[in-house]
Image (cartoon, rainbow, N blue to C red):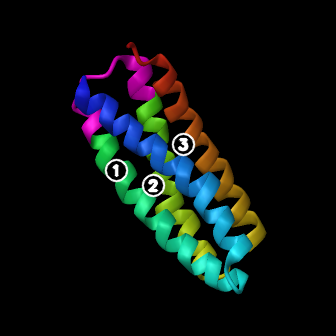
């Protein structure tokens, strides 16, 4: 149970702190949106690695079918952000589209993990 709780807390906490606190502060306080964007890209890249390690650990805890579905959804969202959304943002594809898709996937990942956290037994 400790591996499950720790992995879930680390994954959810890193998403929450970086996505909702750190990245908005970067865009508010750094000298240019480009500088903030480069730093945000590094942080979101790191979030992907945290997600994959924590997701793998969660899958080793023999989750029930609903938990498995939520873990899978969160992992899928993380993978699509990392391998599809981020490269399109870096290559300056349709930035509005890819930021919107990335935001929706980030929210999906966060909501799936929030649901898992709320299902935790004391």
Spatial separation of the CA atoms under disc 3 and disc 1:
12 Å
**Residue under the image location 28 percent in, 33 percent down:** 59
Examine the image and state in which quarter residue 99 appears.
Answer: bottom right
**Residue under the image location 63 percent in, 44 percent down:** 107
Q: Which mark is residue 109?
A: 3
Magenta residues (range): 57-69
Question: Which callout, 1 or 2, points at the residue further toward the start of the chain?
Answer: 1
| Label 1 sits on residue | 52
Question: Is 106 positioned to the left or the right of 122 in the image?
Answer: right
Q: Position of residue 34 (x, y in %)?
A: 67, 84
Indicate the quadrant containing the C terminus: top left, top right, bottom left or bottom right.
Answer: top left
Question: Is 27 positioned to the left or the right of 111 in the image?
Answer: right
Contact between marks 3 and 1 (CB within 8 A): the answer is no
In reply to whether residue 29 is colored magenta, the answer given is no
Q: Nearer the viewer, residue 70 or 30?
A: 30
Spatial separation of the CA atoms under disc 2 and disc 3:
10 Å
**Residue under the image location 47 percent in, 26 percent down:** 117
Spatial separation of the CA atoms under disc 1 and disc 2:
8 Å
Crowd around label 3: few <14 · some 14–19 · many ≥20 (10 Å): many
Q: Position of residue 57 (x, y in %)?
A: 25, 39
Indicate the quadrant containing the N terminus: top left, top right, bottom left or bottom right.
Answer: top left
| Label 2 sits on residue | 79
């Amino acid at each position: 149970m400790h591996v499950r709780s720790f992995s879930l807390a680390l994954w959810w906490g890193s998403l929450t702190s970086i996505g909702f606190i750190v990245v908005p502060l970067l865009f508010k306080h750094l000298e240019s949106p480009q500088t903030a964007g480069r730093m945000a890209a590094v942080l979101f890249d790191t979030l992907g690695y945290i997600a994959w390690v924590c997701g793998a650990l969660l899958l080793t805890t023999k989750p029930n079918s609903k938990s498995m579905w939520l873990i899978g959804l969160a992992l899928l969202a993380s993978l699509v952000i990392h391998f599809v959304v981020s490269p399109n943002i870096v290559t300056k594809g349709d930035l509005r589209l890819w930021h919107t898709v990335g935001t929706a996937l980030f929210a999906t990942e966060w909501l799936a993990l929030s649901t898992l956290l709320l299902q935790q037994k004391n």
